Image (cartoon, helix red, strand yellow):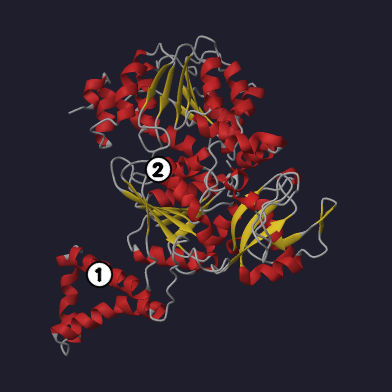
């Protein structure tokens, strides 16, 4: 059997990781550690989220650091604060038996003066987000000229968030003699460019196949009306009483709204997104990691630093717009060899996305029925009985109360006692669910012959898009401002250059159309209408409006290209001058 002892690690490191329960190295650790321990080769490691990349580069790095030399010897770049904090914490734990080795973490949202003081006291390893590190370089508060080892962690995500120029500036300020290690889940062209421009004959190790997910993840989806999305979420959470997971939302606003609704309804939940202060983010993450929180509602970017091995579920409140985001989301569960469930809440219009995900990830997606009220009550009741059966009885502590308890219950026989005892748990759920509706919808393939629009949603066209500076959060905020309709009632959004489409519960259609009547945005009179049309970028219509006939041209490639996930969505985002706005938005959230 493979073990860390066979990889060439020192006794101090082995004792530290043994206390953490590390026994068998993961494939990326097994292949990377012996190469990196040599310390002379540039390296590219490609492995999916949750495969142990931090230990893969962290353990050999700590072996190469010389604690007696009190200058920055290694720099680790991370795309987000949370991931940087996690890396720094892991390195401190791994190096607990190495005397006087100092790891300093620097990131935005915290006091830069305090971080400068820590750097001046001496740092062997600096873990940094690109933006804050550039600030420190400009202030001449950090000197990277002696850095021998540069590690780019989650390189694809850093570039996806718009840090390309920052990374170039940081790399150019380091010594040409350094060794560079690059770790990434994918290898897009920009990551390949960095490896070509800043690395020399790197050793490349790939673990797993591209565009695949962890085999221990069970992928499920629930078909629903968009207006029932939150109620379905609650029902799923109630159906899994011991759930410990992350709920992913599209925007910060939606994240906060969903978290507040869950807390109001009595669920042990909180939000994590870019609008929180660092103190708030630290508090939420601390509570989640120690399981004071059962549910974390998060944006994609904010959740990048979450490294918890025993998450049972990931729930996609809305499917992400990019394939890689789904992979990163679902990879939060089923870590360290455990199993997990990834659940997507989808409307019939989004089912094609699920089919595309299944094809491209080479994974089976099972449509699961939304539990009805009776099923939820049964699951909760049996979970309660399991807890009763497994509870540890404190004999000495409870002994003084036994006589009083027996006296109180002396008129109840065994069967009556069990019924009353069970009813304490059962009644509260039964009261809520006894008249609950069945929220299930059939799949679109089963609904093929039904009238279009019977799923309770309308497809709306609006004549503003990316070239007007519109992204999904701005469009949702605009709809709410103009019409009072919340983002939770808006389904899939397709942004084009000069126009957009979005799905909405048909009960809000007239309200939205009236709300935008006469509206002018950016000097342009807003036109919004119910439509199945799919105009070209030049403004010429394809397809049909409500009640019209579909043209033959609508069956061509132009109609299919927007279905599901595009193969090169990053290229589409960066094209036509709108990429920087999207990058800036993601960087602000990080």
Q: Is residue 574 above or below residue 330?
A: above
Q: Is residue 222 visible?
A: yes
- Quadrant the N terminus occupies: top left
Q: Which mark is residue 382?
A: 1
Label 2, secondary structure: give it: loop
Residue picked out by circle 2? 331
Q: Are there few (<14), some (14-19), or many (20+) residues within 10 Å of tag 2?
A: many
Percent from the top left, x then y, of residue 357? 45, 46
Q: Is residue 96 visible?
A: no
Q: Nearer the viewer, residue 94 or 540?
A: 540
Q: Quadrant of residue 456?
A: bottom right
Q: Is residue 390 above or below residue 276?
A: below
Q: Quadrant of residue 198?
A: top right
Q: Could you tell me which residue is drawn at 33 percent across and 80 percent down?
A: 427
Q: Quadrant of residue 14?
A: top left
Q: Is residue 539 above or below residue 452?
A: above
Q: Could you tell me which residue is drawn at 31 percent across and 69 percent down?
A: 380
Percent from the top left, x then y, of residue 240? 34, 62
Q: Left of 87 or right of it: where is 140?
A: right
Q: Nearer the viewer, residue 10 or 178?
A: 178
Q: Could you tell me which residue is drawn at 39 percent across and 77 percent down?
A: 433
Question: Which circle, 1 or 2, is nearer the viewer?
Answer: 2
Percent from the top left, x then y, of residue 146? 52, 13
Q: Left of 561 or right of it: where is 28?
A: left
- Quadrant the C terminus occupies: top right
Total labels: the figure holds: 2
Q: Could you tell me which residue is drawn at 34 percent across and 28 percent down?
A: 28
Label 1, secondary structure: give it: helix
Among numbered discs 1 and 2, the one appearing first in the sequence: 2
Q: Are there few (<14), some (14-19), or many (20+) residues within 10 Å of tag 1?
A: some
């Amino acid at each position: 059997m493979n073990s860390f002892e066979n990889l060439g690690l020192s006794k101090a490191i082995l004792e530290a990781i043994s206390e953490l329960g590390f026994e068998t190295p993961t494939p990326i650790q097994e292949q990377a550690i012996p190469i990196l321990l040599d310390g002379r080769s540039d390296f590219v490691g490609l492995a999916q989220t949750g495969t142990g990349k931090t230990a893969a580069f962290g353990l050999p790095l700590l072996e190469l650091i010389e604690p007696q030399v009190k200058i920055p010897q290694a720099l680790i770049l991370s795309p987000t604060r949370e991931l940087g904090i996690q890396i720094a914490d892991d390195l401190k734990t791994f190096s607990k038996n190495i005397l006087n080795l100092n790891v300093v973490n620097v990131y935005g949202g915290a006091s830069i003066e305090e971080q400068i003081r820590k750097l001046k006291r001496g740092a062997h390893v600096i873990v940094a987000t690109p933006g804050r590190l550039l600030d420190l370089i400009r202030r001449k508060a950090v000197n990277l000229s002696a850095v021998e080892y540069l590690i780019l962690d989650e390189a694809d995500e850093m570039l996806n968030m718009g840090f390309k120029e920052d990374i170039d500036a940081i790399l150019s300020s380091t010594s040409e003699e350094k060794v560079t290690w690059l770790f990434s889940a994918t290898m897009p062209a920009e990551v390949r460019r960095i490896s070509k421009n800043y690395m020399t004959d790197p050793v490349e190790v790939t673990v797993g196949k591209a565009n695949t997910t962890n085999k221990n993840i069970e992928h499920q989806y629930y078909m629903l009306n968009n207006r029932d999305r939150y109620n379905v979420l609650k029902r799923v959470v109630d159906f899994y009483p011991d759930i410990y997971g992350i709920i992913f939302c599209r925007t910060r606003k939606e994240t906060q709204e969903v978290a507040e609704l869950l807390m109001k309804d009595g669920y042990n939940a909180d939000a994590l997104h870019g609008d929180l202060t660092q103190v708030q983010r630290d508090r939420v993450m601390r509570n989640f990691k120690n399981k004071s929180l059962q549910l974390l509602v998060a944006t994609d970017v904010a959740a990048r630093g979450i490294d918890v091995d025993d998450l049972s579920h990931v729930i996609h409140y809305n499917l992400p717009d990019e394939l890689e985001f789904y992979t990163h989301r679902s990879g939060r569960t089923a870590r360290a060899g455990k199993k997990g469930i990834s659940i997507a809440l989808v409307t019939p219009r989004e089912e094609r996305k699920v089919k595309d995900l299944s094809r491209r990830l080479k994974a089976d997606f099972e449509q699961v029925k939304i539990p009805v009220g009776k099923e939820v009550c049964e699951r909760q009741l049996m979970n309660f009985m399991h807890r009763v059966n497994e509870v540890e009885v404190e004999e000495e502590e409870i002994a003084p109360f036994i006589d009083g308890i027996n006296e109180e219950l002396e008129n109840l026989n065994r069967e009556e006692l069990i019924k009353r005892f069970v009813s304490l748990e059962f009644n509260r759920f039964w009261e809520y669910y006894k008249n609950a509706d069945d929220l299930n919808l059939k799949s679109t393939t089963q609904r093929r012959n039904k009238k279009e629009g019977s799923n309770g949603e309308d497809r709306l066209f609006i004549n503003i898009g990316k070239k007007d500076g519109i992204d999904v959060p701005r469009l949702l905020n605009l709809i709410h401002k103009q019409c009072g309709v919340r983002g939770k009632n808006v389904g899939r959004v397709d942004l084009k250059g000069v126009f957009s489409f979005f799905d909405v519960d048909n009960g809000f259609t007239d309200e939205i159309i009236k709300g935008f009547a006469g509206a002018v945005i950016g000097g342009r009179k807003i036109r919004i209408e119910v439509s199945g049309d799919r105009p070209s970028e030049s403004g010429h219509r394809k397809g049909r409006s409500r009640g019209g006939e579909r043209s033959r041209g609508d069956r061509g490639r132009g109609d299919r290209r927007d279905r599901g996930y595009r193969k090169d969505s990053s290229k589409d985002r960066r094209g036509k001058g709108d990429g920087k706005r999207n990058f800036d938005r993601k960087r602000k959230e990080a």
